[in-house]
Amino acid sequence: MKSIILASNNKDKVKEVKEILKGYDIISMKEAGIDVDIEENGTTFEENALIKARAIMKLTGQITMADDSGLEIDYLNKAPGVYSARFMGHDTSYDIKNKALIQKLEGVKGSDRSGRFVCAIAVCFPDGREIVKRGTMEGLIAEEIKGDNGFGYDPIVYLPEYGKTSGELAPEEKNKISHRGKALALIKEELDKSEELYAEDNDSK
């Protein structure tokens, strides 16, 4: 089976994708020896995922997967949205970001705190074929930070049906219901049917 480059160096995200797509040879940009910055200037999660996947696929000539994900808060007109990673600056800790978002919703109650995690995943093949899938995980913005599992905004997305935040879920539990887990499940269905992925790699002979 051919390797799939994951256009990310986010170690938490790479770990999560590898766990969900067990059986596939997923390698990070770092593992592939790639060190480039890609400007994500799309206006949707799908556009940004495709921008990254296309760029690395063109650079390497190899099958490339990329995701763009973030948090939409309805009360804030779906912000931070595609700017989730850049909200308050890339170098700002998520502890600070999470506290800031909770403060923005001070006094907001119940269903008015609705929001969701969104993940769009794109896979680009050297023959020009592209697959794009989206997954979401609905929830409410918690009134306090809870949970040491996960990463990013996980500790402030409360899941009523579980009675806990995404950051309090065990990894295997989260992967079954998460936005990324859902998107990857749809991607896996397509990858399982991909003849190119399973074709002999003549370049390696």
Image: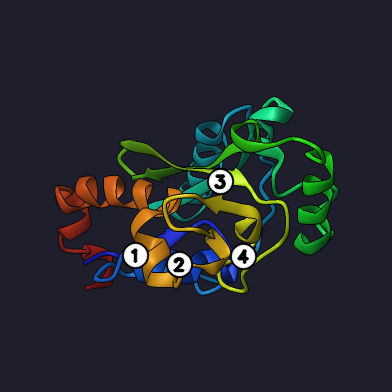
> How far is mark 3 from mark 1, CA to CA?
16 Å
Crowd tier of the residue under label 1, counting other residues whose Cα lies within 10 Å: few below 14, some 14–19, many 20 or above = some
Residue 3 locus on image (x, y percent) = 33, 65
Secondary structure at badge 3 equals strand
Secondary structure at badge 1 equals helix
Residue 75 locus on image (x, y percent) = 70, 29
125, above or below 28, in the image: above
The dot on residue 20 is 1
Q: Which residue is mark 2?
A: 16
> How far is mark 3 from mark 4, CA to CA?
12 Å
Q: What's the residue at 49%, 38% (across, down)?
A: 50
Secondary structure at badge 4 equals loop
202 or 98, nearer to the observer: 98
Residue 2 as seen in the image, left or right of residue 193:
right
Q: Is residue 165 visible?
A: yes
**Quarter holding the N terminus?**
bottom left
Q: Which residue is mark 4?
A: 151
129 or 44, nearer to the observer: 44
Q: Are marks 2 and 3 in contact (CB under 8 Å)?
A: no
Q: Amino acid at mark 2?
A: Glu
